[in-house]
Amino acid sequence: MDHQPQNDVDFLEPSVLLDETHYQEGYKTGYNDGLVSGKEEGRQVGLKMGFQVGEELGFYQGCLDVWTSAIHIDQDAFSARVRKNIEQLAALVSSYPLSDPENEQVQDIMEKIRLKFRVITASLGVKLEYDGRPASSKQDVEDL
């Protein structure tokens, strides 16, 4: 009778091993599929965010180009204070690390650009803003 329980254990062992093998194969397949879909999703989010940043920086650069052209035509088109703010905005826009999106300063630089732009437009007494940007950084995260 001692021999009977040993046979029951031996009988179940291949079933347990087969279950474990299927589990491992399923895990590997799911993991590999997740890597592929995760990379694609990350690529799409990166493209979207990169486009939005480029579009916003392009808007500010376009405004800078107009203001700089006005200054070249007439030095007195703007006050010395506004001209200084325009120069500072130009320096901020050109310092934005376009080729280094993982730079920890990108958010800080963009906020400085936005603030300087608001200072200039307020000084000029014009209502000019970039419409493509969500109202808050929280909205950026919700859009993802």
Image (cartoon, rainbow, N blue to C red):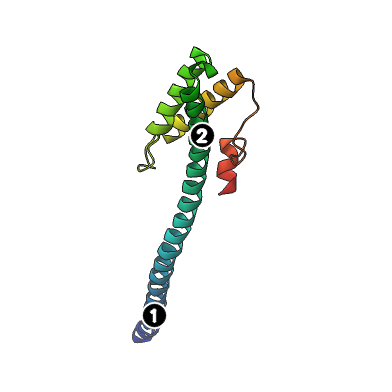
Image coords of residue 101 (percent x, y):
39, 42
Q: Nearer the viewer, residue 47 or 8?
A: 47
Q: Mark 1 — residue?
A: 18
In terms of depth relative to the viewer, which is nearer, 101 or 139?
101
In the image shown, does 73 or 63 lie closer to the viewer? 73
Q: Residue furthest front?
A: 73
Classify residue 48 as left or right of residue 10: right
Does residue 98 sit above or below 123 in this rendering? below
At 48% across and 23% down in the image, what residue appears?
Answer: 71
Residue name at image x 47 percent, y 27 percent:
68
Residue 141 image offset from top left, x and y in percent: 55, 43
Q: Is residue 81 above or below residue 142?
A: above
Q: Amino acid at mark 1?
A: Leu
Q: Which amino acid, mark 2? A: Tyr
- Pick the front one: 15 or 53: 53
Reading the image, the residue beneath label 2 is 60
Secondary structure beneath disc 1? helix
Query: Is the residue marked by circle 1 packed among few (<14), some (14-19), or many (20+) residues within 10 Å?
Result: few
| Label 2 environment density (alpha carbons within 10 Å; few <14, some 14–19, many ≥20) | some
Q: Picture coordinates of residue 55 (x, y %)?
A: 51, 43
Q: Quadrant of the N terminus?
A: bottom left
Residue 119 image point, x, y percent: 56, 21
Quadrant in the picture for residue 138: top right
Q: Earlier in the sequence, mark 2 or mark 1?
A: 1
**Disc 2 to disc 1, C-alpha distance:** 63 Å
Q: Is residue 52 visible?
A: yes
Report if the CB atoms under discs 2 and 1 are less than 8 Å apart.
no
**Farthest residue, direction top:** 80
Task: Label 2, secondary structure: give it.
Answer: helix
Question: Which mark's residue is nearer the viewer, 2 or 1?
Answer: 2
